[in-house]
Image: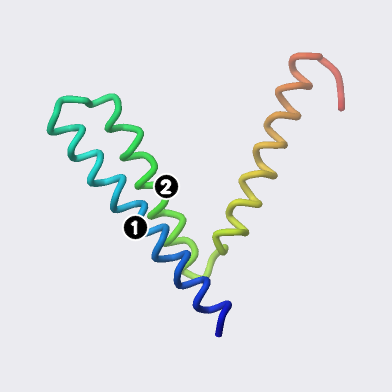
Amino acid sequence: ICLLFEKFLKKMYIFAKAQENLKAAELLIANAMYASSIHCSYYASLQLSKRKLMESGGLSYDQQDQEVKILLFSQQKIALQILLNTDI
């Protein structure tokens, strides 16, 4: 039961963060701060996408975070190989 409640709280937290980012984007747009509104809009989209992926039976939030870390490590390794022109 505790694990289910923890998952529920995390889901609601992600949704609340997304809603707050959307509200911030609206305020920034209303005040002609368009460049800053992009940041808030992007993160709201990311947070809602992560929630939808988790709800659809895909990856949990923790699994999504782990997949991103693996992908970033792979990209950094490739970039280093290109810079050094070697195999790592």
Q: 1 above or below 77? A: below
Task: Relative to 55, say whether 36 is above or below.
Answer: above
Quadrant occupied by the C terminus: top right
Real-space Cα distance between discs 2 and 1? 13 Å
Residues 74 and 18: in front is 18
Direction top: furthest residue: 84
For label 2, the crowd category at 10 Å Cα-Cα, with few meaning under 14, some 14 to 19 and many 20 or more, is: some
Please tell me in which quadrant of the rendered image residue 75 appears.
top right
Could you tell me residue 71's position as x and y percent? 66, 41
Residue at 47% in and 61% down:
53
Of circles 2 and 1, the one toward us is 1
Does residue 39 sit above or below 55 in this rendering?
above
Quarter occupied by the N terminus: bottom right
User: Which is nearer the eye, 8 or 72?
Assistant: 8
Residue furthest to the front in view is 2
Secondary structure of the residue carrying numbered label 2:
helix
Can you tell which mark lies on residue 16? 1
Choose between 88 and 8: the one closer to the eye: 8
Q: In the drawing, does residue 33 fall left or right of residue 55?
A: left
Identity of the amino acid at label 2? Leu
> Residue shown at 36%/47% (left/top)?
45
Left-right relation of 11 to 62: left
The image position of residue 78, as x and y in percent, is 73, 27
* Quarter assignment of residue 34: top left
Q: Mark 2 or 1 closer to N-term?
A: 1
Residue receiving disc 2: 46
Q: What residue lies at 50% left-to-right and 77% top-to-bottom? A: 5
Q: Residue at x 42, y 54 (%)?
A: 49
